[in-house]
Image: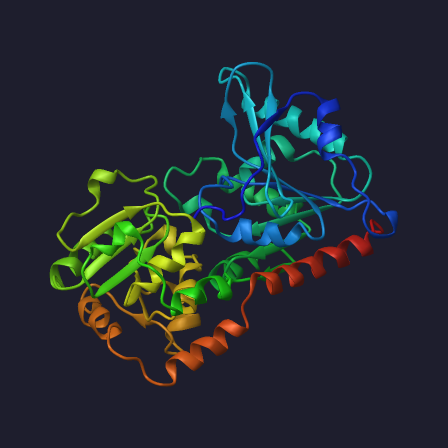
Amino acid sequence: MNSPFPLAQTRPVLGEGALEGAVGPVPGKGGAVRPALLCFSHLRWDFVHQRPQHLLNEAAANYRVFFIEEPEHGPGDAHYRMRTAATGVTVLTPVFDGAADPVREQRKLVQALQRALGAGPVVHWYYTPMALRFARDLPHDLCVYDCMDELSAFRFAPAELVALEGELLAQSDLVFTGGRSLFQAKRQRHPDVHCFPSSVDVAHFACARTSLPDPVDQAGIASPRIGFAGVIDERIDIGLIATAAAALPDIQFILIGPVAKIDPASLPKAANLHWLGRKQYDELPAYLANWQAAWMPFALNDATRFISPTKTPEFLAAGLRVTSTAVADVVETYGKPGLVGIADETTIAATLRQSLAAPDPEWRPAVDRCLARMSWSGTWTAMHGLIAQRLRVAGKV
């Protein structure tokens, strides 16, 4: 689930002169300077490959894209550690002394970055309202809030997050949401909210519909297999996983992904539960190709109330029948049309076993019709159109 786009050798950028040489103005067609997009993220580029990476890799065709991660601590003067993805996205990690004021140091670094950008429009793109602490007053031509999650509902959310999101909504020119539930929640709080649910790289996951070699750490596991691939955190119903494994001892459950914000020792253990850990994004089709079905054992709690899991279309693109708990966006988009089975603790065993049976002949054509309307490139094209329109109205392009 890591980024499939290799990063160039990491290098520090210590002064404004070095920044100017590394990120200075880049002429586009006709000699015009390409606009810059500064993305402020709470996620690291290499954590899991999901919405930010998909969209910003697409955006790099239109913008000079700078992905600013959460900071790290290190000796010496504050600086950015800079890497470049194959798509052209520049990944910047702030590095400064752990005893320093983090807001002051990050603000100083972003100010230096913006001076180094030179002429041309600047778009601020937020994934976390927390970045307002150091970026709120920096000059920009357009502010976009791509709200992919209700972060205030997540475990260990900072106390000031709610207030900062209110400030970000007041400052934003455009608000995008990662699903229907988020759209309904935010549309009352901003006059220009647009729903862009999770999309999918169909070609990447459709490889799993072909015969692919079974990965070494999965090859020795018996069949049938039902799998999940994603971050394993407070959004996952650990109790439901244990219940399903106990009720279906003849089925092997494969669980792939990093464990975050929960104690790994709390994960249930059983002979038919296989926790395979974090995998690269480009490895996933080989794992999925050797499953017989997939599931999404999400807990129904505050952290999942607004989610629109990217896993749903990815599993469907891989040709797998999917069972999910009753996450609102999954039920509305995929459950009601009959594309995904919906289950709770009382029906999970029967629904999972049914998912191993041959599907109705109309199921796969219906899935493919749904997926044909979904692509990250199409999502980005629509977003870019809205951004470009606002910049034109403001006389910035």
Residue 151 position (above or below residue 110): below
Q: Residue at x 71, y 24 (%)?
A: 18
Residue 323, percent across and down?
A: 30, 67
Depth order, front residue of 318/133? 318
Q: How is the image coloured?
A: rainbow
What is the residue that sits farthest to the bottom in this orientation?
A: 361
On screen, residue 340 versus residue 180, left or right, reads: left
Q: Residue at x 37, y 78 (%)?
A: 338
Residue 309, percent across and down?
A: 42, 59
Q: Residue at x 25, y 39 (%)?
A: 264
On screen, residue 322 versus residue 351, left or right, reads: right
On screen, residue 197 versus residue 384, left or right, reads: left
Q: Is residue 147 visible?
A: no
Q: How many tags in the picture?
A: 0
Q: Is residue 61 visible?
A: yes
Residue 168 position (above or below residue 318): above
On screen, residue 262 versus residue 317, left or right, reads: left
Q: Quadrant of residue 106?
A: top right
Residue 51, percent across and down?
A: 52, 53
Residue 294, percent across and down?
A: 31, 64
Depth order, front residue of 30/43? 30
Residue 158 position (above or below residue 271): above
What is the residue that sits farthest to the right in this orientation?
A: 30
